[in-house]
C-alpha cells in the first residue's frame, strides 16, 4: 500500500468516525449524568431528516443544521420527561425514541417530498462543503508532510473540525469546571449532589440537552456533509456503534476519540475489501469487519481486556423524598 | 398497599395508554393530510374484514406472541431482553439447518424437530449475554443489542456463503423439502365449496403459540422455578437470602426467553417463507417489547397485544396499498405504545392513583359519618 492509498483510507476513516464521535460524546454527557441513552440512533436520524429537509427548502445548510439540532432536542426532551420527570425506564424510553424517529422521518418525508421517504438531493449551499485549509495547495508538493496535510487534514467539512474540537472541550468541561464536577457526581451519587443543594433534575436535564445538541450535529453531518440528503434509516446503526464506542472508551472523552477513530477505520476498511486482500495477502470477510465493533465491545464489557465500569447511578431514576 | 384496584392496573392503564397512542397517531395522519377515520376503516376492513385479512393478522400475531412472551418472561426476572431480534434470527438458522439437512418423513415430526432447533439456537444466543451478565457483570441490555448486530452479520455471512445453493445469486438458502411444509389455515379450514384464508400465511404455528402462552403462564405462576424467577425480579437481595442463585435465574430466564424468541422462526421461516432469507425477522423482535409492555407481561395479555399488533401490521400494509400513508406509520404507533405503556407509565398512573385515592378517602369519610349517626 502506498502513502496516497493509506492517506485516502485514513481520510475516509476521519469522515466516517465524525458522526460516531459526535454521538459518542453525546452519550458521554448523558450517561455521565446517570441517564442511559440508547436513543442516540433515533436522535441522529431525526436530525438527519430535518436538517436535510430544511436545508433543501431554505437553501441554507446552517438553517438546516439548526433545525436538525432542534429535532434532536425535541426527542431529548421526551427522553428527559420520561426518564427524569416521570422516572420511567430509560432503556425503554430510548427504544421508543428510536422507533419514533425511524417511523416519523419516513412518514413525514413521504408526505412532504413524495420521493419514497427521502429528501431531494442537496447541492451547493444546502450542503456542508469541504474546506481547504490555508496553504494546503501550496504545500502539496512538500514530501510526506505535504500530502498528509493536503489529503488527510485539509479538505473536510466544517463539522469534522467542530467534532474534533469538541473532544478537548468536553474533557475541559467535564474535568475542569464546576459544572462538570457536578455532572459527574450526579451520575455517581445523586443524593450527595442533592444534599449539597444542587438540583439533580436540573443537572440531568442539562446533560440530556447537551446530548441532544451533539446528536443533532451528528445527524446533520450524516445528511448534509457525508451524504447529500436524507434516506430512510440512514443512521444505519451508527447510534449503537457510538454506544459501543462509549463503553469501549470507558466513559471518558479522549478515549471516545480513539474508539470512534478505530470503529471509523473498520468502517473505512469494509468499504475497501481490495486493500485488505492486497496488503494482507488474504481476504477478510466484510461481515467480520461489520461485526468487529460489537464483538470488541462485548469483550470489553465482559472485562476480559480491562474493566468498563459504568457511572454508578446510571439508569436509576432519582427519588428525592426518600 | 395498592392504591388502585387490580382491574385498573391491568385494564385501565393499558387502555388509556393505547388511547393516547391512537390519538397521537391520528394527529400524525391528520398532519399529513389524510383522514384518521378513513384510515381506521381501511385498516379494520383490510385486517379483519375477510378470512384473508385474518390470515395475515394471525400470522403476524403468531410472530409477536413468541417475541412478546420472550420479553415478558425476562421482565418477570427484571431483565430487559432487547436481543429478541438476534435470537429470532438465530432461531431461523436452527430451523433452516433442521429442515435442510434432516430428511423428515412428515411435517408433524419436522415441526417438532424445527421447534427444538429454533429454541436451541435462540437460547444459545441469549445464554452468552446472560452468562456475561451473571458472571462478569456486563449489562445485559448492551450485550443483547451488540448480539443483535453480531447475529445480523453472522447470518449475512452464512447466507452469501455456505448456506447459499450453488448458482444462486440471492442471499438465501434453498427451498426446504416438501415434507417440511406446515399446513396453512387454508389447508386446514377450507372446504371445496368454501375456500377460506386463501393465500394467507397463517399456519399451524398459531396453535403452537397458544400452547406456548399456556405453558409460560403455568411456568410463571404454577412452578417452583416461576416463583424463584418472580422473587428474583421483585428483589434480588431477598431472593439471594432465600437461597435462590442469581446466576441460575439469570441464565435460565434468558435461555427460556431466547428459546421463545427463536421459536418465532417456525412461523416465519418454516411456515411462511419455507426457506431462510436475509433479514427474515423484520423487526418482530423489537415489537415483542411493545407487546410485552402492552400485555403487562402476562401471557394472556401478551396474546391480546400480539393480536392487536398483528392487526396494526396487516392494517398498515393495507393502508400503504390504498392511501399515501406509508407502512412506517405502524412504526410510529409502535413507538408511541412503547413510550406510553413503558417509559411514560407513571404519567398515566400518577393522576389515576390520585383519583382512586380521593374516591377511597371520600368513601371512608362517608362510612365514618354514617357510623357516627
Image (tube, helix red, strand yellow):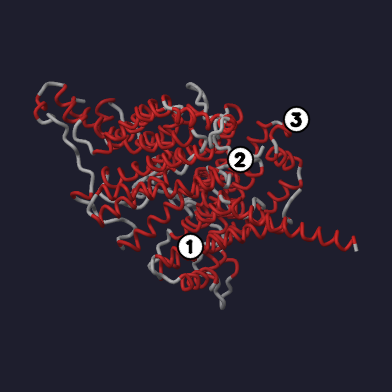
Which residue is identified by label 3? B241
Chain containing mark 2: B
Label 2 CA crowd tier, 10 Å (few <14, some 14–19, many 20+)? some
Q: Residue at x 38, y 30 (%)?
A: A170
Chain containing mark 3: B
Which residue is identified by label 1? B25
Which residue is identified by label 2? B79
Does residue A39 appear in this view?
A: yes
User: Nearest the camera: B175 or B120?
Assistant: B120
For marks 2 and 1, give the CA distance: 30 Å
Chain containing mark 1: B
Q: Position of residue B235 (x, y in %)?
A: 70, 37
Q: Position of residue B172 (x, y in %)?
A: 41, 49
Could you say which quadrant of the image residue A289 lies in?
top left
Does residue B111 appear in this view?
A: no
User: Nearest the camera: A171 or B272?
Assistant: A171
User: Of circles 2 and 1, which is in front?
Assistant: 1
User: Of circles 3 and 1, which is in front?
Assistant: 1
Amino acid at each position: 500500500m502506498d502513502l496516497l492509498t493509506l492517506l485516502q483510507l485514513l481520510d475516509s476513516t476521519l469522515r466516517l468516525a465524525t458522526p460516531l464521535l459526535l454521538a459518542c460524546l453525546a452519550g458521554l454527557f448523558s450517561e455521565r449524568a446517570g441517564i442511559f441513552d440508547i436513543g442516540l440512533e433515533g436522535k441522529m436520524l431525526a436530525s438527519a431528516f430535518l436538517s436535510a429537509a430544511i436545508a433543501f427548502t431554505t437553501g441554507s445548510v446552517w438553517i438546516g443544521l439548526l433545525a436538525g439540532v432542534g429535532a434532536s432536542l425535541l426527542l431529548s426532551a421526551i427522553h428527559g420527561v420520561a426518564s427524569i420527570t416521570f422516572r420511567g425506564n430509560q432503556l425503554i424510553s430510548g427504544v421508543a425514541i428510536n422507533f419514533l424517529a425511524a417511523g416519523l422521518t419516513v412518514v413525514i418525508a413521504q408526505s412532504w417530498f413524495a420521493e419514497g421517504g427521502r429528501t431531494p438531493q442537496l447541492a451547493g449551499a444546502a450542503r456542508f462543503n469541504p474546506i481547504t485549509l490555508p496553504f494546503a495547495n501550496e504545500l502539496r508538493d512538500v514530501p510526506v508532510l505535504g500530502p498528509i496535510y493536503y489529503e488527510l487534514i485539509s479538505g473536510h467539512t466544517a463539522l469534522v473540525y467542530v467534532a474534533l474540537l469538541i473532544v478537548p472541550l468536553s474533557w475541559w468541561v467535564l474535568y475542569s469546571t464546576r459544572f462538570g464536577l457536578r455532572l459527574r457526581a450526579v451520575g455517581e451519587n445523586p443524593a450527595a449532589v442533592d444534599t449539597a443543594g444542587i438540583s439533580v433534575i436540573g443537572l440531568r436535564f442539562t446533560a440530556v440537552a447537551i446530548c441532544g445538541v451533539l446528536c443533532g450535529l451528528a445527524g446533520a453531518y450524516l445528511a448534509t456533509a457525508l451524504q447529500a440528503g436524507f434516506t430512510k434509516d440512514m443512521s444505519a446503526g451508527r447510534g449503537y456503534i457510538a454506544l459501543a464506542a462509549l463503553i469501549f472508551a470507558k466513559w471518558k472523552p479522549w478515549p471516545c476519540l480513539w474508539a470512534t477513530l478505530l470503529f471509523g477505520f473498520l468502517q473505512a476498511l469494509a468499504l475497501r475489501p481490495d486493500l485488505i486482500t492486497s496488503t494482507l495477502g488474504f481476504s477478510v470477510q466484510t461481515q467480520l469487519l461489520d461485526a468487529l465493533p460489537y464483538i470488541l465491545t462485548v469483550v470489553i464489557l465482559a472485562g476480559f481486556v480491562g474493566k468498563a465500569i459504568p457511572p454508578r447511578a446510571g439508569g436509576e431514576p432519582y427519588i428525592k423524598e426518600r | 398497599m395498592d392504591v388502585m384496584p387490580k382491574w385498573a392496573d391491568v385494564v385501565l392503564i393499558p387502555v388509556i395508554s393505547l388511547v393516547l397512542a391512537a390519538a397521537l397517531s391520528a394527529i400524525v395522519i391528520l398532519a399529513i393530510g389524510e383522514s384518521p377515520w378513513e384510515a381506521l376503516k381501511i385498516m379494520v376492513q383490510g385486517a379483519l374484514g375477510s378470512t384473508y385479512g385474518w390470515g395475515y393478522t394471525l400470522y403476524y400475531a403468531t410472530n409477536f406472541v413468541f417475541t412478546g412472551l420472550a420479553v415478558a418472561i425476562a421482565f418477570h426476572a427484571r431483565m430487559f431482553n432487547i436481543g429478541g431480534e438476534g435470537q429470532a434470527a438465530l432461531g431461523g438458522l436452527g430451523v433452516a439447518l433442521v429442515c435442510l439437512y434432516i430428511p423428515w418423513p412428515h411435517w408433524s415430526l419436522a415441526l417438532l424437530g424445527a421447534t427444538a432447533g429454533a429454541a436451541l439456537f435462540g437460547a444459545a444466543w441469549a445464554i452468552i449475554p446472560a452468562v456475561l451478565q451473571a458472571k462478569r457483570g456486563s449489562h445485559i441490555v448492551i450485550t443483547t443489542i451488540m448480539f443483535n448486530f453480531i447475529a445480523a452479520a453472522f447470518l449475512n455471512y452464512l447466507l452469501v456463503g455456505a448456506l447459499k445453493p450453488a448458482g444462486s445469486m440471492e442471499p438465501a438458502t434453498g427451498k426446504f423439502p416438501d415434507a417440511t411444509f406446515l399446513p396453512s389455515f387454508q389447508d386446514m379450514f377450507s372446504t371445496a365449496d368454501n375456500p377460506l384464508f386463501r393465500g394467507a400465511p397463517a399456519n399451524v404455528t398459531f396453535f403452537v403459540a397458544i400452547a406456548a402462552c399456556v405453558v409460560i403462564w403455568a411456568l410463571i405462576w404454577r412452578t417452583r422455578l416461576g416463583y424463584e424467577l418472580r422473587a428474583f425480579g421483585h428483589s434480588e437481595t431477598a431472593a439471594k437470602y432465600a437461597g435462590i442463585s442469581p446466576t441460575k435465574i439469570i441464565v435460565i430466564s434468558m435461555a427460556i426467553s431466547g428459546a421463545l424468541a427463536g421459536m418465532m422462526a417456525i412461523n416465519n421461516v418454516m411456515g411462511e417463507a419455507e426457506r431462510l432469507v436475509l433479514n427474515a425477522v423484520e423487526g418482530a423482535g423489537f415489537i415483542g417489547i411493545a407487546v410485552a409492555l402492552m400485555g403487562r407481561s402476562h401471557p394472556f395479555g401478551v396474546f391480546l397485544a400480539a393480536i392487536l399488533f398483528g392487526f396494526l401490521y396487516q392494517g398498515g400494509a393495507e393502508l400503504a396499498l390504498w392511501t399515501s400513508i406509508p407502512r412506517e406509520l405502524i412504526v410510529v404507533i409502535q413507538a408511541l405504545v412503547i413510550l406510553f405503556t413503558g417509559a411514560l407509565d407513571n404519567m398515566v398512573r400518577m393522576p389515576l392513583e390520585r383519583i382512586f385515592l380521593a374516591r377511597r378517602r371520600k368513601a371512608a369519610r362517608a362510612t365514618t359519618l354514617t357510623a357516627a349517626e
